[in-house]
Amino acid sequence: MTWEIVRIITFAFLCFMVAFISTPGIIKLLRRYKLGKNIRDAASAPVMNKLHAHKAGTPNMGGVVIWGAVVLVVGLVWLLCQLDPNGVWCSWNILSRTQTYVPFGAMIAAALIGLLDDYLNVRGLGPRGGGLRKRYRILAYTAVAAMCAWWFYAKLDWDVVHIPFAGNYEISWLYIPFFIFIIVATSFSVNETDGLDGLAGGTLMAAFGAYAAIAFMQGRTDLAAFCAAIIGALLAFLWHNITPAAFFMGDTGAMALGTVLGIVAMLTNQPLLLPIIGLPFVIESGSVIVQMISKKLRNGKKVFRSSPLHHHLEALGWGEPKIVMRFWVVSFIFSALGILIHTIDK
């Protein structure tokens, strides 16, 4: 047990160091090639445009720092293990068929889709200069989720969903659409949260911390170490992303980490704890859905001054650091609640 704790902390530390050291160079690279944030036009989002006009041009695609560090550290250890199967590196390797192959591969796939979308966005390409069409984005991430769902169902023989305090229930082939829904909903919800300096990074850190603890209690130490690696990289990212942000996460970070978070929830068989552990993501995406329905059914009338919720709070006069810190507080409280429920449920 002590060795597993050492391994988990080591991966968090190594990913933090790699991300922290590489970040200044990546920011300079993003600035050199003018890969900066485009703010939504004033006609479609007047409130957000007014509040965030000063952020136009801030480097985007900062999520590369997070997933890049994780891929480098985890991938390098795996490679060294393959080169020397009997060597010490194999005791450090955390890539395993039943725990981390799927989240590792899905993170890379989702990150690359997001990277393409970010690039098109900053170059003003795509419909109204906004990157990939939303329907294409949904299709792309659904395809990633579907491949992961197939792996779970066909390769890992997984068709069980745990309901807290009620037990496990087999849902047969329905597991596949359920899996896809969880992954797509989580990834897009996390992406909606990526709108203020430090907001997505801090809330994701709390959520991954909760699932790392749950995975550890279940004996899934490879998965716990993988979550810890992401937390370490997130900490380095946040060093440069808190107000005033030196760069933004972008879709390449938010969509990739949202995808991984959903998969981790499925791997621990605790997807129904996700709305608790990830409550800020639920609130953010929920506010967008409510706003859309209200505008369609009430002749354009809005419930919020702007959506997601964090923009509404800005419009009410809340300062950005105040909003972010309070979202972080909520995240850590409900992440702790999720751990508590899992512990009692055992």
Image (cartoon, grey):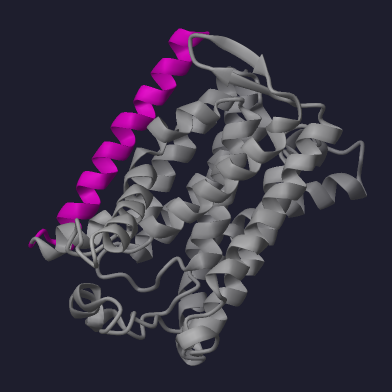
Residue 222 is left or right of residue 283, and the answer is right
Residue 71 shows in the view: no
Residue that appears at 51% across and 32% down = 211
Residue 177 spot, x, y in % from top left: 67, 40
Give yes or no for residue 331 being in the magenta stretch. yes
Residue toward you, 150 or 296: 296
Task: Report the number of discs.
Answer: 0
Residue 64 spot, x, y in % from top left: 56, 67
Residue 319 shows in the view: yes
- The quadrant the N terminus occupies is top right
Start and end of the magenta stretch? 317-346
Give yes or no for residue 101 being in the magenta stretch. no
Residue that appears at 43% across and 22% down = 339
Residue toward you, 286 or 293: 293
Residue that appears at 17% across and 63% down = 305
Main secondary structure found in the magenta portion: helix
Residue 307 against residue 44 in the figure, above or below = above
Residue 41 against residue 197 in the figure, above or below = below
Residue 184 is left or right of residue 55, and the answer is right
Residue toward you, 84 or 168: 168
Residue 10 spot, x, y in % from top left: 58, 40
Question: Extreme left residue here?
Answer: 317
Residue 287 is left or right of residue 218, and the answer is left
Q: Quadrant of residue 139?
A: bottom right
Residue that appears at 11% across and 58% down = 318
Residue 27 spot, x, y in % from top left: 46, 78
